[in-house]
Image: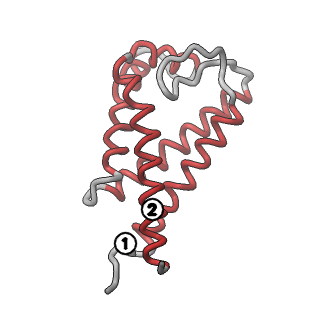
Amino acid sequence: MGMNQSLIIISLIARLVLVGVFVTAALPKIQDPVAFGQSIVAYRLIEGDLVAWTALALPWLELVCALGLLTPWIRKASATWIATLLIVFITLHVSAWARGLDIDCGCFGASDENGTNYSLSILRNVALLAAVSFLIWLDFVRKNPLKLKT
């Protein structure tokens, strides 16, 4: 198996993992934006109408970007948005952890758990950021390496 084929397989796995995670995260929040809004309020960073708009818009952005990773004409933009979201999520977790907040992050909708394992959440998001960074590198820097040469 050549280098190009390895890149194709690795990028496909990375795309599918990212799609799975972001679709799994988006759907429960789309179904229950009120519960997601309560998770947003728990971070104590925004309030009022901005919470409602964020609770309504963010899950749809996650869903569209996730599906966009599989759509050739928007995959670069989708990957860039996902990277941006992951940086924001990592920053929010670090901020909440540093402020001693014991909250349910709302990452995958409402949950029964009390509090967030911040180190695990941050580690997960850093791993996802590494995966999407690899895809961005492939799409922007390598300039379409996914076409097999015959």
Residue visible at 34% across and 84% down in the picture = 149
Q: In the image, 46: left or right of 58?
A: right
- Of all residues, the one furthest to the front in this rendering is 1
Q: Residues within 10 Å of mark 2 (few under 14, many from 20)?
A: some
Residue visible at 69% across and 20% down in the picture = 101
Vertical placement of 125 versus 10: above or below? above
- Of all residues, the one furthest to the left in this rendering is 73
Numbered label tally: 2
Query: Where residue 89 sits: x, y (%)?
Result: 55, 37
Query: Where residue 58 sits: x, y (%)?
Result: 39, 31
Q: Quadrant of residue 98?
A: top right
Q: Quadrant of residue 22?
A: top left
Q: Quadrant of the C terminus?
A: bottom left
Q: Residues within 10 Å of mark 1 (few under 14, many from 20)?
A: some
Vertical placement of 64 versus 140: above or below? above
Residue under label 2, please give it.
Answer: 11
Query: Where residue 10 sits: x, y (%)?
Result: 49, 63
First along the sequence among labels 1 and 2: 2
Vertical placement of 76 versus 38: above or below? below
Q: Amino acid at mark 1?
A: Leu
Please report contact status of discs 1 and 2: CB closer than 8 Å, yes or no: yes
- Of all residues, the one furthest to the bottom in this rendering is 150
Q: Amino acid at mark 2?
A: Ser
**Relative depth, front residue between 42 and 134:** 134
Residue visible at 47% across and 70% down in the picture = 7
- Mark seen at residue 146: 1
Residue visible at 34% across and 78% down in the picture = 148
The residues bearing labels 1 and 2 have C-alpha atoms spaced at a distance of 9 Å
Mark 1: which secondary structure?
A: loop
Query: Where residue 87 sits: x, y (%)?
Result: 55, 45
Mark 2: which secondary structure?
A: helix
| Snapshot colouring | secondary structure
